[in-house]
Structure formats: structure tokens, C-alpha cells
Amino acid sequence: MKIMNSDYYFIKPYDNPNDLPPKESFNDILNETYMHPFTWNARTTRRSFWISTLINIILFFICGSILPIALDSDINTGLKWIDLIVIAIIAIWGVLASLGQTIRRLHDLNYSGYWYWASLFTAGGYFLFYLALQPSVQRPVKWGGYLFIDPNQKGSAYYLQAYNEDTEPIDLTPVPTVGQIIKEHYFDCFNWKARSTRTSFWIGSAVSVIATCCFALFIGLSVALLVIKSPYISIDTGMVILLGITIVASTIGLIWTLIAQLGHLVRRLHDANFNGAWFWICIVPYIGFLLLDFLLFHPSVNNDNDWDDYLFKHKDQINK
């Protein structure tokens, strides 16, 4: 079996070098970022997004550096509240500008701007970072076009076309039901020579996180009741046996959950047409987990996949 394949990438290359997205000038990027923070029904290029992100970081650093000076009575003898208002306005405008750019970047990848809320979670933040690194979708999208585009630039005419839903590529990746996802996650954990969709894996991972927290809580509380002597709690022999059973059962559940997560992870790698051996990249501290997440974020590879099919049947999926 091979570890690397034609779909191997951490940052996806462009599909067609002849229809590259427009290259905005630095002035256009500044105009787009700070003069159109609320123009969300549009898209922005990867280059524009990352340049504006760098500018925002510098802007926030300057605001943070000026703030202590503005609050120092020995240095700033004027009206401090005016300085604070100016700093607050700049910072808030920078946040809004960043929000607008992020939403337009999601649109540029043909994702809804509502995916921005995924940043509330750690894995969701990684996913947005992964998306921000990927190239533009090389076709018109339903969320509008680029704010600044030179019609004389090579390939620009292609992106000036109106969006046509009939020309949208059809996603053949099945979406299993929640019940089927949980069944696959816990009862097919040793079936590694198979595939698992991105939706199935991340829902299964969320279930694993909740289950792990619950099992760890049960173990912790049971051990605490056995070890810590309290005058308010009387523990007899029956209670000791019950707590012992709880600890053993929770430990078994915790181990089973970890094995289930490993099996789901290997199937997800197979679905992206990667060998399950890529799991071992996580032994590299931090960077390994980040790169593994990037591979797990990859969409399903429906053609020329080296591993078996999905575990669920046709009747167990939502989109038939």
C-alpha cells in the first residue's frame, strides 16, 4: 500500500493554472478590508486575506503598545478618555474588517460564511485555518464575486461570469444518519479496512470527547469518594463495591472510546485516500497533531480510492 498519492497535500494546488484568481493591488486590498467590512456577499483571494491579516496583526500590536502609554499619567497629561476612544475605535474596526475578510474568504472556497462560528471550538478554528490556506475555487460561486477585479487581467473574464447552479459540481459523498455514525464509531472500531466520511468522523469525534469527559468524571468522583474521608458521607461495603464497579466500567468505557476514535481516524484517512500509517505523524509534538488535522480535513476522494467502501448501507444515509 502506498502512503503518498496524487491527492497528497497540506495546501492544495490550483486545479487549472490558466484560470487563476485575480491579483489585487495593495491599495485594493486595503480598500477591500477597511472600507468594505460589511460587504459580506462577495469573495476574496487567499493573497488578499493573508496580507490583510498581517496588517491587522500589526495594527493590533500598535494599539496594544500605545495603550499603556495612554494610561500613564506621567507621560500622557492630556485627556486619556479621548486616546482610549480612538484606540477602541481602531481595534473594533480592525475586528470587523477581519470578520468581513474571513467571511469573504469562506465564500471564495464555496463555503457559507456561517462556518465562521466553527472558530468557537478548537477543532473548528483549525478547520478555518486549513480553509484559509487553500486556493480559491476556480469558478463563480453563489456568494458573489471579487470586489476589485481588472477585466483586462488574464482569466478575469471567467470570474466575471454570473453564477449558474446547473454547472455546480455534484458532491457524491454520502451523509450517514447520526445513529449510523454512532454505530460505526463504537461497534465497527476494529474494522479499519474501510472508509469514513468527514461528517461521520467529526460527529464521532465530538461523541468521543463527551464520552471521555463523562467516563473521566465518573472515575474521578468514584476515586475521590473512596480516598477522601468525609464526616458527611458514610461509605459502607455495598457503596465500596458499587464505586469499584463504576471505576472498572468507566475505565473499560474510556479504553473502548479511545479504540473507537482510533478506528474512525484510520477510516477517515482512508476516505481521503491516505494510508492509516499517517496516524503516527501525531508523535511529533503539536506540529504533528496540526498536520494530522489537516489530513483529516481533506474532502472525500470518490475516484480511485485504494481502500474498501463505507460501512453504512444505502438506506442509512441522508442524501440518497
Image (cartoon, rainbow, N blue to C red):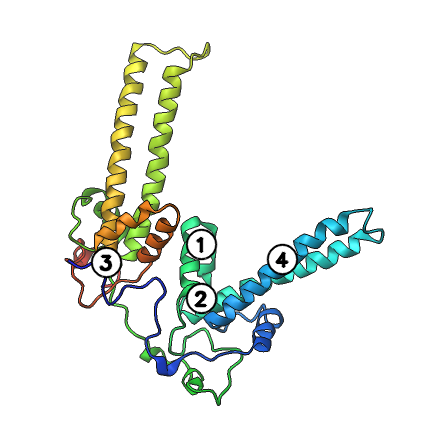
- Marks 2/4: CA–CA distance: 23 Å
Q: Position of residue 301 (x, y in %)?
A: 24, 64
| Residue identified by numbered label 2 | 106
Assess disc 1: are there few (<14), some (14-19) or many (≥20) residues with their C-alpha within 10 Å of its C-alpha: some
Return the residue nearer the eye: 35 or 277. 277
Q: Where is residue 45 in the image (x, y as percent from the top left)?
A: 47, 73
Of badges 4 and 1, nearer the viewer stands 4
Residue at horizontal 54%, vertical 63%?
A: 53
**Label 2 with label 4: CB-CB less than 8 Å:** no
| Left or right of 111 on screen, residue 317 | left
- Marks 2/3: CA–CA distance: 25 Å
- Element type at marker 4? helix
Amino acid type for the residue under numbered disc 3: Phe
The label on residue 274 is: 3
Compared with 112, 238 (above or below) is above
Return the residue nearer the eye: 201 or 296. 296
| Residue identified by numbered label 1 | 125
Assess disc 2: are there few (<14), some (14-19) or many (≥20) residues with their C-alpha within 10 Å of its C-alpha: many
| Residue identified by numbered label 4 | 60
